[in-house]
Amino acid sequence: MLYVAIAMVGLLGFASLTVDIGIAFTAKTQAQAAVDAIALGAAANMIDVDGAAAVVTQSDSELAGITVASENHAFPNPSLSISANDLTFGNWDFDTRTLDDSVDLNNPDQVTAVTASLQLNGVQNQSVPAVLSRVLGRTSFNVGCTATAYLGFAGDLGPGEVDLPIAIPCCLIGGCEGGYCGGDVAPVVNQCPLETAQARADSTVSCIQFSNTADQTGCWTQFDGMSPSVNTNQLTSIVNNGNGDSVEADENIYLDNGEKTPVMKDIYDRFYGEGLFQDNPAGSDTDGDEIIDSWLIQLPVVTCQDSDHCAKGEPAPVKGFVCAEVREVIVSGNNKTIRLNFVCPQSDPTRYAKCLQNGASTTGGEDFGIRATIPVLVK
């Protein structure tokens, strides 16, 4: 009986590990699921892209996080509580997997993530009660967990959200790591003048050329990573009917070069409202001079094409998406061109906002100016 009495202390200790630690881990699993949801809810409301320019909406994000917490549970709490102090905003570094909270929290380009913290410690939320451990003097267990959600830049465009069968090589707009829209004014690349007299000040724009030579600066694509065949019929079908599939970052798509005169003619007709698009132009007159001069579109950005100039070969991965405003379409001459402005939130917030009206986008692309609206967990 003496040996049994002594052994009972150890047996109760092991029983408490089996029962109470199991209960604590169950509570932690529930709490982690809750804090994941809190971080995602806060991140989804962290940046407002519906207005004239993207802005940080920290108070909305905090309210969303607090609301999501109240809608979740973790034993023994039927509803959870957090405060605004439990949410930390900053810039997520993928290399170091850390959140830098020292950035300007009013700058939407620097605020890309939020870390949520949740504690079951008897203060905001009840701690996890002990059962068998009480005989050893332990009445409860504290549980804590965190999650970080990232709201970066557009990682996909859904069916119908890409208007033209064109991809922009990332070297044309500053490199494949993004950052093209980092300044106050979007730079003009591969400059050329508008041929039609315009009242607007931007008489010099970016020139996207199509040819089978080194002059090629834009790539034709069917958004297909399975077949290297990029044919004119399919390209014109996309111009006339839209792209039926989604386009995603890191997806490989085949490219092609050349003038593709029938495709350029259809783009011309769609922009100006001629041919199949008679009296129904995709472009609009923005300055009242009765000249079509603006068509806001989103285009995928692919890896650099300096060596093969979009010629057929290995498929190229999509790096992200850029907003562009078509200003002119030129179909005469040897080199067919689309003359456009790349649009950034700082330099042209009104037109940038219109680029975002096509629909929601998940995070996943590099920074070419278009913010995502659906966050992802990164930690």
Image (tube, rainbow, N blue to C red):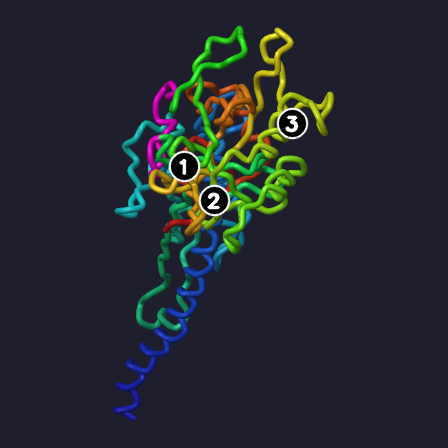
Residue at 37%, 53% in the rendered image? 145
Residue at 51%, 36% in the rendered image? 166
Residue span colored magenta: 174-188
Q: Identity of the amino acid at label 1?
A: Pro
Report x, y in % for residue 60: 49, 32
Q: Which mark is residue 169?
A: 1
Categorize mark 3 by other alpha carbons within 10 Å: few (<14), some (14-19), many (20+): many
Q: Identity of the amino acid at label 2?
A: Leu
Which type of secondary structure does the marked residue at label 1 adopt?
strand
Q: Nearer the viewer, residue 362 or 179?
A: 179
For the question of whether residue 151 can be seen, the reply is no
Report x, y in % for residue 352: 50, 24
Q: CA distance from mark 1 to mark 2?
A: 10 Å
Q: Identity of the amino acid at label 3?
A: Arg
Q: Quadrant of the N terminus?
A: bottom left
Residue marked by disc 2: 255
Residue marked by disc 3: 270
